[in-house]
Image (cartoon, rainbow, N blue to C red):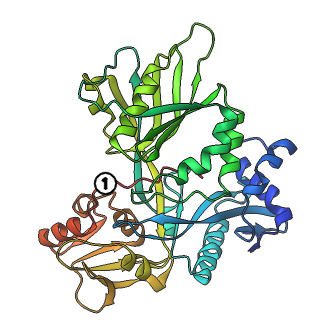
Amino acid sequence: MSDFSVRLLRSDEDRAATDVFRRALHVKEMTDEEWAAIASSMQPDRGFGAFDPELIGAVRSFDTEVTLPGGGTTPLAAVSLVGVRADRTRRGVLTALMRAQFEDLADRGCPAAMLHASEGAIYGRFGYGIAARGKSIEVDRHRARLRPEVPAGGEISLLGLEDTIAQWPSLFDALPRTRPGMIARTPHLWPGYERDVRRANGPTATAVHRGPDGVDGYVTYIVERAHFGAPSILKILSFHHASPDAFAGLWRHLLSVDLVDRITAEKRPLDEPVELLFADLRQVTVQKIQDEGWLRLVDVATMLDARTYQGEPIVIEVRDPFLEHNSGRYRLSSDGAARTTDPADLAVDADTLSMLYLGGWRASDLAVAGRVRATGESALDRADQLFSTRVNSWCGTFF
């Protein structure tokens, strides 16, 4: 095993760190033009590199906030661009990078982190758990017919590429982030989105829905086909709505776009009722269900007390070998959460607690898989109630 050191990246090392990440994912290094387009997305002092003595691994994040069950928010580190050079894997490099990042988050008072995982077996050992999932759907545009009682919706206006890029931040900020797991989109995110739509294979459009009180939804999409005569696919890139009228009105617009055979959307909320809009539910096909957001409670005590609970109290024992200060017992109730020495009703590892936290999984289901250890059915029933949420967890933002 070779020696290496981990330190904060300098701004002039950000491009090299990004290339390490891209090579780890078997993606070509960026051109000067590509780097110029996204360089401003690198928040200063949020990247860590491993050196041996050259750069062999990196991880970075940007500061944002996440919506919690109950409607509150808390600071969050959105973790991205994690990679280790292929000739230095399985030597503790990623573990060291994760430790450095968690220590930095603790020093800055950031109690949680979230990421999108390229592989599902990597991050559990660091205490990350799948806190939100999404479904990818396909709609047969020719056969799908809306039910007569579906709301008519309000006014729709269409934006082209340049107006989409200019108005994206204000459109997103105009809508409430009501689902647990949704994050604020900071200025560091938008350059990457702009780069992606500019190099897309089809023209980008955004349909904006306005209700009585103004903008209450929008959908951004492209239409692609492999060659002339091939099926045309309308791909939804971003879809956010704040009312039933906006949801229905935007889907009416998508179905009205001519020369389209299929409509697809990836990683939508599990409980988003698209199929209920149609006379024949079978015209909406769920292609797959995927992990959509991985959460890590860096400060378990702070995070458990930050969200709300409904139901009878319970004592939960947390085992966190990677961040040992989190290990211990916590009493959860409608009054909040606090450390306790009372006997535990159930026990979980840190990654499983992350899965429970946003309400994306039931404790009783996780117990079937051996991931929750409970004293009895009553404890599981109380845990199911305490961690439940009105709507499914969903991040809705890729980073």
User: Is residue 315 left or right of 193 when viewed as pictured?
Assistant: left
* Nearest to the observer: residue 32 or residue 378: 32
Q: Residue furthest top?
A: 229
Secondary structure of the residue carrying tag 1 is loop
Q: For the residue carrying disc 1, how many other residues have a C-alpha within 10 Å: few (<14), some (14-19), or many (20+)?
A: some
> Taking 385 as reference, is 344 above or below it?
below
- Percent position of residue 370, x then y: 28, 63
Q: Position of residue 64 (x, y in %)?
A: 57, 65
Q: Which quadrant does the N terminus fall into?
A: bottom right
Image coords of residue 166 (percent x, y): 68, 44
Q: Residue at x 41, y 54 (%)?
A: 132
Picture coordinates of residue 242 (x, y %)?
A: 40, 48
Which is nearer the eye, 60 or 218?
218
Q: Is residue 10 visible?
A: yes
Q: Is residue 128 visible?
A: no
Above or below, 345 relative to 232: below
- Image quarter of residue 340: bottom left
Q: Residue at x 40, y 43 (%)?
A: 212
Residue at coordinates 39% horizontally, 60% vertically from top-left? 180
Name the residue: 24% across, 82% down. 344
Q: Quadrant of residue 221?
A: top right
Q: Is residue 388 left or right of residue 29?
A: left
From the viewer's perspective, tell me whether residue 237 is left or right of residue 309. right
Q: Give, as a three-letter code, the residue at label 1.
A: Val
Q: Which residue is mark 1?
A: 391
